[in-house]
Amino acid sequence: MKDNPNPQEIIHRRGNRHVRVYINKEPLYYPPHWHTDVEVIAITEGTYRVCCGGIDFPLQTGDILMICPSVVHEIFPESPGSRIYIQADLLRPLHIYELDTAFLLLNPAVHISKDTFPSEVYDDLWKLALEIKDLYFSTSLSSSDKSGESNIHATDDLPLYAETMICAKILEFTALVGMNSPTRNFQENKKDDTLEKPTEDILPLLNACGFISEHFTEQITLNQVAEHVGLSKYYFERLFKQFTDMTFYQYLIQKRISFAQELLVNHTLSVTEIALTAGFSSSSAFARAFHQATGYAPSEFRTMNESKNFTKGKVFTPEQAAAAVGHVAKANTPPPVCTDMFS
């Protein structure tokens, strides 16, 4: 694997499932990585520190962190303890436009604690997280039966409709977070005198995300989207950047790259066909954008996504860990344990 400062995590789930849950009881260091799944980390015991998009989130027992899709994050164990990890691919299979907007507004992550959320909402979010965990492990040994293991994974497939119920609970979790979160971007925008009524600009932003989701494979422009939502090009460009912390074109490329990753699983399509289908003008433009986003050529990503022979569960030096995940470790990085980031 090539050196890449922010490698993508390839999440292999059971069968063709869109969700993955596991319990981590070992203090593990995860180098900077990203994935297209939304990730929820619920701290049941101990302390943790997660850096998302350059922002530090110190987590205590009872805290939950929701990390938005495609956000580069790095995880530092502060003490021994136990954490529930929930990962779900919601954007591609469901195509709910509101999710695009929600994750843009909540980017890069939301820290859920007793201090930041109303008590009844905090309790409901924890209840949902535990229900998701119990559903996922419903046909496997309970965590109490596997207390000696450092990382607990479900061993059996999900029963009929369990994944649907889990996805419904994750959607409810996301909606509760979005409706009750003191989001960083929104708070900052309220202080901006140039945006007199920022709350009224949510609807045009939602409509813009819906339009982009319908037409991102076409040659759409900033002018077209701004005209579609009834705003001037310059105001829409500034509004989009302030609320999402990315430009319109960065978001458009991100949508195309995510779609291309899905298409790369299909071996009947060539890389050139995938490039044009995803909305890129040429295979060379696609290759450049894909490499910039993931650190890999499309053909390398396709091969890597097929392989399940990743090293896991061993203690490495920083240099060995860097080679394992494509991350150039700093000299003072503590020796990490590379677990099944890719399992």
Image: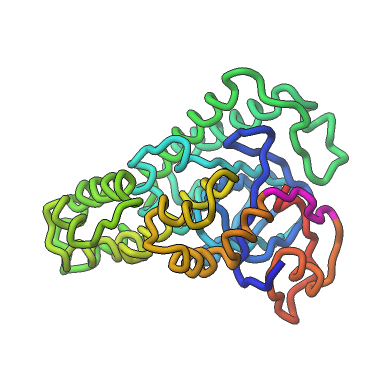
Give percent across and percent down for residue 147.
84, 37
Residue 212 visible somewhere in the drawing: yes
Q: Quadrant of residue 14?
A: top right
Left or right relative to 16: residue 317: right
Q: What residue is shown at x 68% (from left), y 70% (from top)? A: 2
Compared with 98, 108 (above or below) is below
Q: Which residues are magenta?
A: 306-313
Question: In this view of the protein, which residue sits in the foreground, 25 or 285?
Answer: 285
Most frequent secondary structure within the magenta stretch: loop
Front-lying residue, 141 or 91: 91
Q: Is residue 216 above or below residue 18?
A: below
* Residue 214 locus on image (x, y percent): 31, 44
Q: Is residue 240 magenta?
A: no
Location of residue 251 by image quarter: bottom left
Instruction: Please state the horizontal and vertical placement of residue 274, each as a whole percent of the image.
Output: 48, 52
> Is residue 255 something one can see in this rendering?
no
- x and y, in percent, of residue 117 in the image: 44, 46
- Quadrant hosting residue 48: bottom right
In this view, 267 is above or below 234: above
Give the camera-side residue of 259 and 172. Answer: 259
Report the coloring of the rendering. Answer: rainbow
From the viewer's perspective, is residue 340 above or below residue 196? above
Q: Quadrant of the N terminus?
A: bottom right
